[in-house]
Amino acid sequence: MTLAIDTGNTDAVFGLFDHDTLLHTWRTPSQPVAAPAHYEAKLRLWLLEASVPLSSIRATSLCSVVPSLTPVLRTMLADLFGTEPVVVGPGVYPKLPLEILRPSEIGADLVANAMAAYTRFKRNCVVVDFGTALTFTTVSATGKMLGVAIAPGLKTAVRALFANTAQLPEVPLELPTSALGQNTVHAIQAGVVLGYEGLVRSMIARIRSELDGDCLAIGTGGLVRAISTLQNDFDEIIPGLTLTGVKLIGETV
């Protein structure tokens, strides 16, 4: 079995694979100040509950966009399994079948998304990842990363309103019945949720136009199903795509 970890600014997501099958996914808040033992205790508990012995895990790989947390998780994995994990970053990119745009700048999670999409489809793809940030990563049929677009994520947008205004509450991410909000909660939902519906559709359409219409749209991320009206805009929705990319990078290098 293989363990892959995708660490974002909000959560660290652990995925356990048996060959190409994602058996288990576990999520915990990213805590850069936590010691390796904090994450080791969580992982041991999850594996115990899933009846998975530590000895069955033969390889580990790590993707992190939180620099202060990367060495914490790297140490935890090395101590627990006795071997260094593959860490997604510029040091391993030359070994991948991808032509990576600005290797020293691009987020490791975006490379993982491109790796998974390219490996699976071998076609022009835009991966729309609904996380702390809303990202659009486009990779060509030949493995060239063509570009990235980044916007604040859904929760990030709502929290920004909540944090920077005196009277606006933090609201649930639910699709309102109308764009004409009749109270404060519905007004925020109309502006953010319906606004992001239009943002995602517009970006997919623009990217496809720049590629002469030849581009699959793949949805992923923890909030990929938050806007139900977008589900038919994607050729496929693959919640575990980033973890799959992290695993594939680990196997490739």
Image (tube, rainbow, N blue to C red):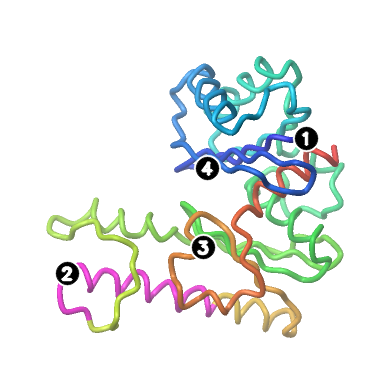
Dot 2 or dot 3: first in sequence order is 2
Dot 4 or dot 2: first in sequence order is 4
Magenta span contains residue 166 = no
Q: Secondary structure at mark 3?
A: loop
Q: Position of residue 224 (x, y in %)?
A: 51, 63
Q: Which residue is mark 3?
A: 224
Q: Depth-wise, is mark 4 or mark 1 nearer the camera?
A: 4
Instruction: Tell me the CA gap for discs 2 and 1.
Output: 48 Å
Dot 3 or dot 1: first in sequence order is 1
Instruction: Tell me the CA gap for discs 2 and 3.
Output: 25 Å
Q: Which residue is mark 2?
A: 184
Q: Tell me the quarter of the picture where residue 184 sits.
A: bottom left
Q: Using a 10 Å C-alpha cutoff, classify the residue at mark 2 as few (fewer than 14 neighbours), some (14 to 19) or many (20 or more).
A: few
What span is in magenta? 181-202
Q: Is residue 60 left or right of residue 160?
A: right
Instruction: Tell me the CA gap for discs 3 and 1.
Output: 30 Å
Q: Which residue is mark 1?
A: 91
Q: Using a 10 Å C-alpha cutoff, classify the residue at mark 1 as few (fewer than 14 neighbours), some (14 to 19) or many (20 or more).
A: few
Q: Position of residue 57 (x, y in %)?
A: 73, 28
Instruction: Tell me the CA gap for discs 4 and 1.
Output: 20 Å
Q: Which residue is mark 4?
A: 8
Q: Is residue 186 left or right of residue 32?
A: left
Q: Depth-wise, is mark 3 or mark 4 nearer the camera?
A: 3
